[in-house]
Image (cartoon, rainbow, N blue to C red):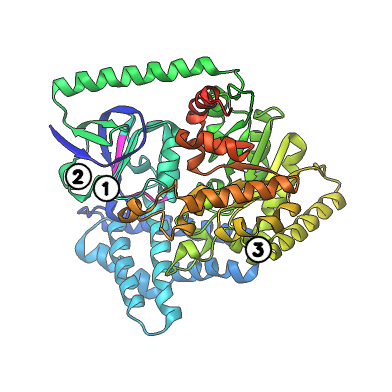
Amino acid sequence: METFTGKGVYGAVAIGKISIFKRREVSVKRNHVTDTEGEKARLAVAKELAVKQLQEIYEKALKEVGEENARIFETHMLMIEDEDYNDSIRNIIETQKVNAEYAVAVTSDHFAEMFRAMDDTYMRERAADVQDISNRIIQNLDSGQNKNGMGDHKVIICADDLAPSETVLLDKDKVLAFVTAYGSSNSHTAILARNMNIPAIISVGGEFLNAVHDGDEAIVDGFTGEIFLNPDSETVERMGKKQQEDEEKKKLLLKLKGKENITIDGTSIKIFANIGGVDNIGSVIVNDAGGIGLFRSEFLYLESSDFPTEDEQFAAYKKVLESMAGKKVIIRTLDIGADKQVGYFGLEKEENPALGYRAIRICLTRPEIFKTQLRALYRASAYGDLGIMFPMITSVSELETIFHICDEVKSGLRTDGIEYDENTELGIMIETPAAALISDRLAPMVDFFSVGTNDLTQYTLACDRQNSKIESFCDTHHEAILRLIEMSAENAHKNGAWIGICGELAADTALTETFLRMGIDELSVSPSFVLKVRDTVRSIDLR
Ligand code: PEP
Ligand code: MG
């Protein structure tokens, strides 16, 4: 048995087999083939399909994001037909007698290298495009395979790190736990693990990846951050007991279902849940959340291979609202960028992505995308109690522009005779120090604030939330953060707005009393934390 220790980001125990996460680029194998003509025929079919897919994407993009942004897909179609590119693939198949996937991957690397070495910036950027089209062809070539080779059993996923776009594509029903060599506790993978109620350990270190193999037996202890590889019988027994005790404790919390979130002295607070998609609703209901305080709508985009249409979005939002049967549902508009990258957005690589082109900045500069989402949201507002929330706000003028666009969207719906709720609440995330500092100006403009402590912490303490090396500097209880929250709460209440917290700090029960004393109206936490926070609230006496 070998033991490794990292940082547990969700307390639970998982016992099972390891599955090493394989990125597409490393999963392409070199196979010897005899039938090179057959390989070339497979390639032709995969290429034809890729062109068809790109044509569809191009047409959709043309409608939704305009000609300029759609042009990239036209470029991709031209690149697929490029003579040099195709000659290279065919040559490799014929001369090396290898499978088409491998020939495409080698050609892709070769062309990408060539583009990267060019002086011209435009040409250098084509490196990512050639990799993109090659990945599409490879995907079409082996589309019959299991998603990331996960097989039929539940497994412990091990990786160096996982990007949100990678985590969303995993088959969630097959994941017992996440273990990553790197990563940080505020990363979206950690958040996703909490949303899914599965143990996760991050920052176990590179040596762990060298020691672990596919199919190894392992036990993950999300409480202590330990992972036991090929555990001995004593550890299996001890951890089995721990797992059982934990499950019993969680069952005990279920007794709090239906109870009020009220302190001993009679102060009450709302406890809502954070979700990433329609799939999480079951957990919200089981854990008796009073509503949804944050629906990270960008996961709809991350799960999709193309811009989700207005109708697709409308169907998802409507489903969430209807499932919540009249309870409040706050849907945050697209918060893409930084660590949440989506290929089809064609975002450029940036030096400082967290400070870069992300969230509302994308929506305000690509209004076609924003308007499609707002139209879907307003259409869904007729089916429940919707609140729309805007991320990464830093100024009054941003909010003025947003409201102007909302008015345009509503006016379009009226013209089309489509029903929507005129009283839909509008709110903003307080996740930049700027928003907190001008909360006296922003509060009169909105119905509510929701504090995003994950980003507020990163921007206030100048600590990259993705960087595990500086986690010890990232004190989430720092006085500066608490002061910004308190200031925002005072300004919200002075101006008739309500305030919630939807960052991970909302579930930190060491701060529940502090938040209650600040007059925070709502805490929105991962579904599995709802009852734990309720338990804490009920034990507090503010007198
Ligand atoms: C936050 O920043 O606290 C937040 C809730 O948003 P996200 O974690 O999705 O950036
Ligand atoms: Mg945020």
Labels 1 and 2: the sequence-earlier one: 1
Near mark 1 (Cα within 10 A), the count class, few <14, some 14-19 or many ≥20, is many
Q: Name the residue under label 1.
A: 181
Labels 2 and 3: the sequence-earlier one: 2
Residue farthest to the front, as pictured: 543
Quadrant of the rendered structure where residue 411 is? bottom right
For the point 57% across and 31% down, the residue is: 281
- Indicate the secondary structure of the residue bearing disc 2: helix
Amino acid carrying mark 2 in the image: Phe
Q: Between tags 1 and 3, which lies in front?
A: 3
Q: In which quarter of the image is the C terminus?
A: top right
Cα separation, mark 1 vs mark 3, equals 38 Å
Residue 395, numbered circle: 3
Q: Is residue 261 left or right of residue 305?
A: right
Are the two marked residues, 1 and 3, in contact with CB atoms closer than 8 angstroms?
Answer: no
Q: In this view, does 362 lie to the left or right of 533?
A: right
Q: In this view, does 139 lie to the left or right of 298?
A: left
Q: Where is residue 412 in the image (x, y as percent from the top left)?
A: 82, 54
Amino acid carrying mark 3 in the image: Ser
Establish whether ligand 2 lies closer than 8 Å to the Cβ of label 3. Answer: no
Q: Name the residue under label 2.
A: 208
Name the residue nearer the viewer: 263 or 472. 263
Report if residue 160 lies within the magenta region: yes
Residue 61, numbered circle: none
Quadrant of the rendered structure where residue 135 is? bottom left
Q: Is residue 333 visible?
A: no
For the point 35% across and 54% down, the residue is: 473
What segment is highlighted magenta in the picture? Answer: 156-163
Amino acid carrying mark 1 in the image: Ala
